[in-house]
Amino acid sequence: MHSIDRGEVEHFSTLSDKWWDESGPLWTLHRLNPLRLTYIRDHLVRHFGERALKKLKVLDVGCGAGILCEPLARMGMDVTGLDVVEENIKAAKTHAQAQGLDITYYCQPVEEHLEENAEKYDVVLAMEVIEHVRSPDVFVQNLAKTAKPNGIVLGSTINRTIPSFLKAILMGEYILKLIPKGTHEWYKFITPDEFSAFLLQAKLKTIETLGFDFSPFSKEFRFSANKKTNYFIAATKDKK
């Protein structure tokens, strides 16, 4: 079973040339990136040790045009990015080449990548992607299969609550127009308990869920104890 949602592919195909425009329709992801990088780096240092960072193999699933892949590569990590939108991968390759960065990109779903890359990666990222796939439980199982024993899987997404509908969809897409209309569908949002259950089914152990909030006034993201809208989640894979 594949995880591709064709409607989502069509939507994001229309944005493929806008990924690197920091004032364009995907500007919120650029504002979120520093928080994502802090969260990722903190967990990797805690799990592997700071000296190991430059030796880590990282898979970013749903990488878009590489706005998270590039700073990770600059930290010295061996980064691979996956996306199912061909135009995104073309944009990612072009931008990385212009920056002189050695990043491997594939236009394929994770289950296809898995066929030749099982248990290859120390770190598997699924940032702002699970809410855009079919069969999220199967998607998480495939993420887990790409991780090495003692690997770590990190994700972020939107909780399925009334506040998330009001903030992410009503305010974000229709009133304040912070992101393009149709980017999210509320029924596809995943609660922390559901995400943790998917991880457990995939034989991963959830070690943390942490909320984060966005201020439309400062236009900044920050960590929060409140997980009613956005949250990060971290899980580990047992050693063999």
Image (tube, grey):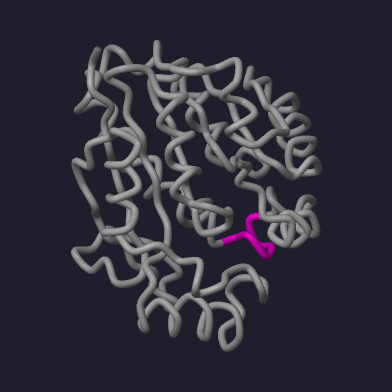
| Position in image of residue 185 (x %, y %) | 56, 72
Q: Is residue 76 visible?
A: no
Closest to the observer, 40 or 155: 155
Residue 23 in magenta stretch: yes
Residue at (42, 47) in percent of width and height: 34
Residue at (28, 50) in percent of width and height: 196
Closest to the observer, 10 or 218: 10
Q: Is residue 138 left or right of residue 109?
A: left
| Position in image of residue 109 (x %, y %) | 64, 37
Q: Is residue 92 visible?
A: yes
Up/down of 7 relative to 121, above or below: below
Up/down of 209 relative to 101, above or below: below
| Position in image of residue 77 (x %, y %) | 46, 19
Residue at (52, 24) in percent of width and height: 73
Residue at (50, 66) in percent of width and height: 188
Main secondary structure along the magenta-highlighted residues? loop
Q: Is residue 94 left or right of residue 53?
A: right
User: Where, by quadrant of the figure, is residue 214 drawn?
Assistant: bottom left
Q: Quadrant of the C terminus?
A: top left
Closest to the observer, 234 or 104: 234
Count of residue discs: 0
Q: Which residues are magenta?
A: 22-27
| Position in image of residue 53 (x %, y %) | 35, 18
Residue 191 in magenta stretch: no
User: Where, by quadrant of the figure, is residue 206 drawn?
Assistant: top left
Q: Quadrant of the N terminus?
A: top right
Residue furthest out toward the bottom: 175
Q: Is residue 206 left or right of residue 149?
A: left
Up/down of 239 relative to 80, above or below: above
